[in-house]
Structures are given as C-alpha cells and as structure tokens.
Image (tube, rainbow, N blue to C red):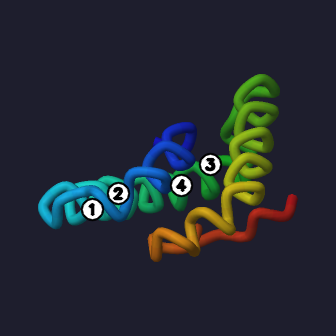
C-alpha cells in the first residue's frame, strides 16, 4: 500500500466515501503490522536481510510522511529513525 500512496493522493478527492473508509482501514491494519515488525527488529529476531529491508521500509515511510499527513492517515506508530 505504501507504494500506492502517490496514486491514492492524486485520486483522493475523486474517490467515493466507501473506498476512502476502506483505504483508511487498510492503512490502519498496516500500521498495526508495523508495530509487530518493529518489535521483531528491536528484539533481534530478524535476519540480516530482513533488517535491511525493514530499514528500507522505514526510509520509505519517512519520505512519505507529507503524503500520509495530506491524506489524514494514521501516522506510523513507531520511530522511523533507527
């Protein structure tokens, strides 16, 4: 969903209410999964490759913060600085 944010932002004003609610709900679920991933990262339960990919994900999230705010989506519930 993160990679779709620019497209979602462009179409946001033309999107129906039901789809907006669905998108927001999906995003909230992703943020819940992010909490779980962060716990795994901080507990050292990830492989080196997984840790690298997780840091890449955090960088993408950080770069997307203006769009996340523009869409009034839930902010990431974890620190994006590692």
In front: mark 4 or mark 3?
A: 4
Residue at (68%, 57%) from the top-left corner?
64
Q: Earlier in the sequence, mark 4 or mark 3?
A: 4
Q: Earlier in the sequence, mark 4 or mark 1?
A: 1
**Residue topped by disc 4:** 34
Residue at (19%, 55%) from the top-left corner?
19
**Residue topped by disc 3:** 40
- Tell me the SS state at disc 1: helix
Q: Position of residue 66 (x, y in %)?
A: 68, 68
Label 2–label 1 contact, CB within 8 A? yes
**Crowd rating for badge 4 (residues with CA inside 10 Å; few <14, some 14–19, many 20+):** some
User: Which numbered disc covers residue 29?
Assistant: 2
- Tell me the SS state at disc 2: helix
Residue at (56%, 38%) from the top-left corner?
3
In front: mark 2 or mark 3?
A: 2
Q: Earlier in the sequence, mark 2 or mark 3?
A: 2
């Amino acid at each position: 969903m993160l990679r779709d944010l620019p497209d979602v932002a462009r179409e946001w004003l033309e999107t129906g209410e039901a789809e907006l609610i669905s998108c927001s709900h999906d995003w909230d679920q992703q943020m819940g999964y992010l909490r779980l991933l962060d716990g795994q990262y901080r507990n050292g339960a990830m492989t080196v490759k997984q840790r690298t990919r997780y840091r890449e994900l955090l960088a993408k999230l950080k770069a997307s913060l203006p769009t996340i705010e523009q869409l009034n989506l839930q902010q990431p519930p974890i620190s994006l600085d590692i």
